[in-house]
Amino acid sequence: MVGSDSYYRDSVAPTPQPAAPTVKKQDISLYQFFGPGGVLSRTHPAYEFRRGQLQMAQAVEQALEEKRHLIVEAGTGTGKTLAYLVPVIRSGKRVIISTGTKNLQEQLFHKDIPFLEQALFPGGEGRLNVCYMKGRNNYLCRKKLYDLTGQPVLSGLEEIEHYRAIAAWEKTTQTGDRAELAELPEASALWHKIDARSDACLGQKCSSWDKCFITEMHRRAMESDIIIVNHHLFFADLSIKQQAEYAPDAGILPEVGAVIFDEAHELEDVAGSYFGVSVSNGRVEELCRDVEASLQRNHMLSASISGALKSLRERSMFFFALLPQGEGRFSFENRREFLEENGDEFTGLQQSFTRLGSELENLPSKPEEVFNFGRRTQELQVQFGFLMESEDRNTVFWIERRRGGRDKLNVYLQATPIDVAAILKTCLFDQLECAVLTSATLAVGGGFEYMRRRLGLEHTRESILPSHFDYENQALFYVPPDLPDPRTPQFAVKAADRIRRLLEITRGRAFVLFTSYAQMNDVYQRLLGELDFPMLLQGDAPKSVLLEEFRLTPNAVLFATSSFWQGVDVQGEQLSCVIIDRLPFAVPSDPVVAARVKSIDAEGGNAFFQYQVPAAVITLKQGFGRLIRSLHDRGLLVLLDNRILKKQYGRVFVESLPNYRKTTELAAVEEWFGAGQGKL
Ligand code: SF4
C-alpha cells in the first residue's frame, strides 16, 4: 500500500489557503537556474547543461506571461518536465498538467516536483500544493460499496474475497484509489460494479457525499497550485462542462491560468473519443442490472417494472443482433437503409426506454438513485436516437464488436467527430489564456502545420528545440533496398530472413515492432526455433510483465505491435536495436480514418499528404524514439519498408526524423557493431 498522502501533498492545513510559494523572477533568472554553475547544476546529481531545456523554459515563461499558446517539440533527453515546471512555479498561477501516460504522471508527482521543491525552497520555506488525479473509475464509490453490503449479488468465491479486501481497505484509505490495492486484479469484475464512474453518481444528493473520495479529490484540486491529470480525465471533464454549458458546478477540474499538455501528440484521438457518443449492449444491461438491484434492495421491484426491464433487455438484445455483422471496427454508413428495414425494432427499443422511464417516474416516494436511473434511461434513449438518425456531417457513425470474458460479445454503436479542430478551438483554446503543447513528436517536415490544423490551434508561438543527443553518432538507421514491397505476399518470408540476420549481428537485444498482429504472428512463427535468443511475444503476458522480462533477460527479442511503439523506456545495452516492419500508415479502412480522408479530399485537400503521411511520420518518430533514451545509448534502427527510399512521400519521413547516420548496406551494420560502436 502506498502512503495515505500519495495523491495530495501540502505542508499546511488546507484552509485558510496560504499564498502559493513562488520564486520571484527578480530573485533568479532562468539561466541562473538551468545554466552552468546554476541551481540545477548544484542540486541535480546527473546535471548537464542542455541548451534546449533552457530555451524551452524561456519559451514557456514567455507564453505564460503573454497569455499565448505555445507548441514546442522537445526530443527525448531535453529534460522538458523541468523546463515547464520551473516557469509554472515562477508564474504563481494555478496550472493543470495533462499527460498521456501514467508513468509520466507518477514521475512528475513523485520525482520532478519534490526535486524542484527541494531545489527552489531549500530552507523549507514553502511547499507546493500538488494534486494528482486519475479517472473516476480508479476510485471507489462508497455508496455502491455500502449498497452491496448484505446483497446476494456477488458471483463466485473470488468476488467474495475481493469484496472483503475492499471493504476492509475502505475503512482506512484516504484516497480510495484502487492502485493502493495491489492484490486486486486489473480485470476485477467486482471493481467495475463499485467504482466511482459518473454514470451512477448521485452528486450532492448522495448520502455519502461528504466523505466521497471524488468530493475530496475535487476539494483538493480547488486548493492546489499544480493539478496533474491524464488526457482522458481532462477531456472527459471538458466534455461534461460543454454539455452542461459551463455551469459553475459542472466537472471536477477547477479553472486554471494555463494547461500544459505533455505527450500532446495524442490529443486528437483522445479528444475525438470524448466529444463523440457511444452506446453498447453492455451499457443497457448495466442500467437494467442497477435498476433491478436498487429496487430489490428498497423492496420496490414491482411486476410492472420487472416487465419493463424484461422488455428493454429483449429489445436491446434483438436490436444489437440485427446490426450489420463484422468483427472489430467498421463503418455504419447505411444507417438509413438499416432503419428502413428494421425501423420497427428500433422504435420498439425506443419505446422500451420510454416505458422504463415512466415506470420509474411513477414510483411513489422514490429514493434519490431512482431519479438518476431516470436520467440514465433518457440519456440512452436520446443517444440511440442521435446514433441512428442524426445527419450531422462532421460525425462518422460506426460499429465495434469486441469479445469480452466468458464468451461475451460487446457491441458498441459509436459516433465520432470527423474533425475535432473546430470543437477544440471553441471549447478549449478560445477559453484558455495559455496552453502549452509539448512532445518529442509534434513536428512534421520541420513545422507544426499538421498539428495546428488537426487541433484547431491558431496564433501560437512555435519552437523546435535542438536535441541533446548526438544522433549521428548514437544511432545507425538502416533501410534494406532489396526487400519486396511490404504489401506483397513475398514480404513476410524475406523480412523474417533479414530480421534473423540483423538479430545475429545485434545479438538479440531488440524490439521488433509491427503495424499489425497478423504480420507480427506470421514473422514470429517463421523465426520460432530459428533464433539463438529468448523470444517474447506481445499477448503472452501483460505489457508490464513482458517489459520487465525483456529488461531482465540477456539478449531477449520482443515481438510487439502498436502498444509498444510509445511510452516504453528501456535504457542501456539491453535494447540495442529497434526494427519496424513498415511505414505505420493508419489502416485506411478504419471508419474514423476513412471518414477523415474522405472529408479532407471532399474539401479539395489532399488527404494523403495532409493527413495520412503526417500521422504516420509522428508514429514512426515515436517507434524509433524507443532506442536512444540517454546520452550513452547506441544502437541500430531498421525500417524494412523501402518505400521510404523509393516513393516521393518518403522524403517527408526522412526529413522529419532526427539526423541518424543512414545506410542501405548490411556491411555497414556489421561494421557499426563490429567496430564497437554499437552497444556491445
Ligand atoms: S457522490 Fe457519487 S461517487 Fe461519491 S459516493 Fe456518492 S454516488 Fe459514489
Image (spheres, rainbow, N blue to C red):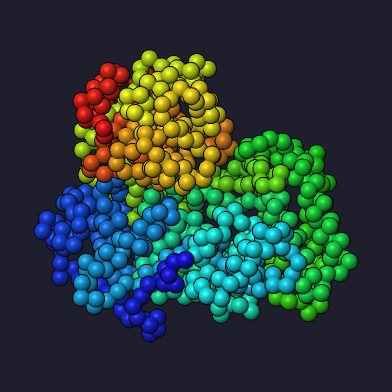
Instruction: Please state which of residues 631 and 76 is positioned toward the viewer in this rendering.
Output: 631
> Which quadrant would the C terminus be assigned to in this image?
top left
Q: From the viewer's perspective, is residue 365 above or below residue 595?
A: below
- Residue 89: x and y in percent read 28, 67
Count the numbered circles shown: 0
Which residue, as the protein is rendered here, is positioned at the far right? 303
Q: Image point 46% across, 47% down: which residue?
A: 544
Residue 672 in the figure: left or right of residue 176: left
Instruction: Please state which of residues 592 and 431 is positioned toward the viewer in this rendering.
Output: 592
Instruction: Please state which of residues 619 and 190 is positioned toward the viewer in this rendering.
Output: 190
Q: From the viewer's perspective, is residue 557 above or below residue 207?
A: above
Q: Image point 35% across, 19% down: which residue?
A: 480
Residue 146 visible in the picture: yes
Residue 258 visible in the picture: no
Residue 43 in the figure: left or right of residue 141: left
Q: Image point 37% across, 72% down: which residue?
A: 9
Which residue, as the protein is rendered here, is positioned at the far bottom? 16
Residue 87 in the figure: left or right of residue 142: left
The quadrant holding residue 104 is bottom left
Q: Image point 54% across, 39% down: which residue?
A: 539
Q: From the viewer's perspective, is residue 319 above or below residue 189?
A: above
- Residue 639: x and y in percent read 37, 27
- Residue 672: x and y in percent read 24, 26
- Residue 21: x and y in percent read 27, 74
